[in-house]
Amino acid sequence: MKMKNRTYYRTMLLLGVLMLNSCSSNSETETKPVDSVLVKKIILTHSANDIETFTYKYDGNKIVSRKNDGGFVSNYTYTGNVITKIEELSDNKFQSSRDYTYVDGKVATLVLKTNYDGTDTHSYTYNSNGTVSYKRTRSNGVNTGILTIVNGNIVKNEVFYNGSLSSTYTYEYDTKNNPFKNVLGFNLLLDTNEEMFSPNNMTQDGGGTPALNYTFKYDANGFPMERKLSDANYGSSHRLSQYFY
């Protein structure tokens, strides 16, 4: 009888320890600080036979590199806590570079160089009404523009040629967390690229015709697990992005 009691109590003790460990593990996962979440991998499905995987490397919350499985890599350089250079290579051959300068903690200039289209220079002016004016200089001419920013997201880009409004592009966002929200310095880079600037996720990209519309699935922390191109104009092969943290 005593032996049976000992066995019973040992079994119950072991079950209690396992349950405690399980609860502790779940609690740690659920309470993981949102500001520590960094995307480690993205799988892009362009079509059934065209799938691309990107992996990301960090030093703390500073991004070091972005690589795909086809030999493409982006390398990031920081000066202090701001990104001053992004260089893109394909099979170790130069593709493009972005060099940034800053004034009072904000991007002042961007110099974009490519191996196919020369040099493209942007200079930025921060206006008292919260908009940002820019001047873009290329080999084929100069144009200016105004970026309208709401809640940290670029919602409108007005482009002017010879002083007259030429094009207006609009963008819409959700209220969830951009997968790159916690990458140091990305919030300073004035760009509508999904990996830069915006704290939220773009649900409509009005930068072209037709506009692109996206739907998302989110995790418990409000970060996207999936992003899907939902515009019917693109048929059944909707582009799908899957995020891993």
Image (cartoon, rainbow, N blue to C red):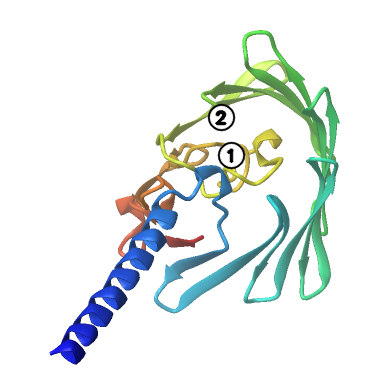
Query: What residue type is disc 1 on?
Result: Thr
* Residue 152 sits above or below residue 111 on the image: above
| In-front residue for pair 241/245 | 245
Three-letter residue code for mark 2:
Ile
Locate residue 74: give its quadrant.
Answer: bottom right
Which residue ends up furthest to the top in the rendered image?
Answer: 128
At x 51%, y 46%, the residue is 33
Please report the residue visible at 23 percent of the width from the left and 78 percent of the height from the top: 9
Q: Is residue 235 above or below residue 208?
A: below
Residue bearing the label numbered 2: 154
User: Residue 161 at what x, y percent from top left?
Assistant: 69, 23
Residue at x-position 36% and y-position 50% = 220
Label 1, label 2: how far apart the Cα atoms are = 7 Å
Q: Are marks 1 and 2 in contact (CB under 8 Å)?
A: yes
Left or right, residue 51 beside residue 17: right
**Element marked by disc 1:** loop
